[in-house]
Image: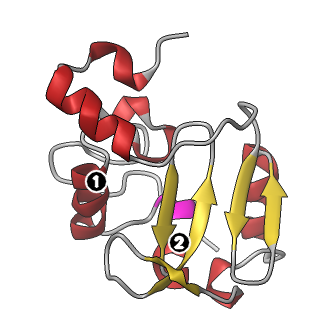
Amino acid sequence: MKSPQDSLDSSERRLYEEIPHIELPVLRLEVAARDKVLVFDPNGLLAAIMSGDFDARQMEPAEYWPSIISGHPGLQYRCRDMVIELSPTEMDRFLRHDLNPEEYQAIRLRYPWQPEDYFDIHDDFYDPGTGEALQPLER
């Protein structure tokens, strides 16, 4: 399987190596708060959001995970492709593929490779040119 770093030049590769990565199984997603880590598979996460069983906005953020968008205390999302810190409200929108264009662009600046390299921001969910959410998950 091709990884995001395969197509990078040396300066991009250095930046990529600075971004935190963890080795998780392909279908394992984690949402971590100050006091707990919830584990999902992709379909289970969507089902939990749609049923109301999971709401990232109700999780307790941690100061040691500042949001890469706002700098507010955050939660940490972990998957095979990325580790990202977002405030609870931003995390809710991220998980529902409902970021606003400014939030999408902020993530793209932090993860500068092709959006298709990162499932959660690829072009089925966002217009790569405008950052507009194409299929936001309704609650």
**Left or right: 55 with respect to 87?**
right
- Residue 34 at x, y percent in the picture: 70, 83
User: Residue 12 appears in which quarter of the rendering?
Assistant: top left
Q: Quadrant of residue 15?
A: top left
- Tell me the kind of residue under disc 2: Met
Q: Residues within 10 Å of mark 2 (few under 14, many from 20)?
A: many
Along the line of sight, which residue is nearer the eye, 10 or 2? 10
Q: Would you say the residues marked 2 and 1 are in contact, meaning their CB atoms lie under 8 Å apart?
A: no
Q: Which residues are magenta?
A: 93-97
Work out whether residue 89 or residue 125 is closer to the camera in this orientation and state it: 89
Q: Which residue is mark 1?
A: 110
Q: Quadrant of the C terminus?
A: bottom right
Q: Residue at x 69, y 64 (%)?
A: 31
Q: Is residue 137 visible?
A: no
Q: Residue at x 67, y 89 (%)?
A: 60
Relative height, residue 41 to residue 17 (above, below) = below
Residue 24 image position (x, y, % from top left):
71, 38
Identity of the residue drawn at 82% across and 57% down: 39
Check disc 1 and report its element: helix, strand or loop.
Answer: helix
**Dot 1, how many residues are within 10 Å of its Cα: few (below 14), some (14-19), or many (20+)?**
some
Helix, strand or loop for the magenta stretch, by majority: helix
Residue tagged 2: 91
In which quadrant is the N terminus drawn?
top right
Please state which of the two labelled residues, at mark 2 or mark 1, is closer to the viewer.
1
